[in-house]
Image (cartoon, helix red, strand yellow):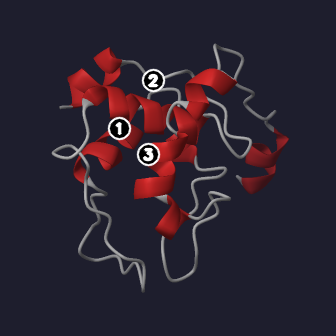
Amino acid sequence: MSVYLKSLPAHEYTGPKVTEEQAQAGAAIYEERCEKCHSASGRGGIFSAPPLAGSAIVQADNPASLINVLLYGPSMPKEVSFGNWETMQGYGDKLRDEDIVAVGNYIRGSWGNVGRPLTVEDVAKQR
């Protein structure tokens, strides 16, 4: 099975990408709300938070999981230990849909991440 999986070509995203302008619109929100745990490099930390750089959830074609984490915090199974990572609180009651879009686009357009831009409609579906 592993030989077969390794033989498959890498999936390269070819759709619309978050622009520099869209990404920068969320930079201040990321710095204020996310950077402490996920770091300026998006690499997270062994005792603070998981990495966002290179994250499959961040770059998924369907952004619903990322939006849900931003709105409600991560949903973690009781059986799985996340070690010393702090539990992220959701920002659904603290940020407007436009702010969730801005920080989501910052995350999807930084550190080599690639994904289509989020929209207010995407966030409204998950609320």
Identify the image quadrant of the C terminus: top left
Image point (42%, 86%), residue name: 84
Q: Nearer the viewer, residue 66 or 19?
A: 19
Q: Is residue 18 visible?
A: no
Task: Judge whether 127 appears above or below 87 on screen.
Answer: above
Q: Amino acid at mark 1?
A: Ile
Q: CA distance from mark 1 to mark 2?
A: 9 Å
Label 3 residue SS:
helix
User: Could you tell which of marks 2 and 3 lies nearer the N-terminus?
Assistant: 3
Instruction: Specify whether 41 is left or right of 97.
Output: right
Label 2 residue SS:
loop
Q: CB under 8 Å between callouts 1 and 2?
A: yes
Q: CA distance from mark 2 to mark 3?
A: 15 Å
Q: Amino acid at mark 3?
A: Ile
Q: Is residue 93 visible?
A: yes
Image point (73%, 45%), residue name: 5
Whole-percent x, y for residue 119 in the image: 40, 18
- On residue 118, the disc is 2
Q: Amino acid at mark 2?
A: Leu
Instruction: Specify whether 59 is left or right of 90.
Output: right
Instruction: Specify whether 59 is left or right of 4.
Output: left
Label 3 environment density (alpha carbons within 10 Å; few <14, some 14–19, many ≥20): some
- Residue hosting label 1: 67
Whole-percent x, y for residue 100 in the image: 35, 35
User: Could you tell which of marks 1 and 3 lies nearer the N-terminus?
Assistant: 3
Instruction: Specify whether 99 is left or right of 96.
Output: right
- Residue hosting label 3: 29
- On residue 114, the disc is none
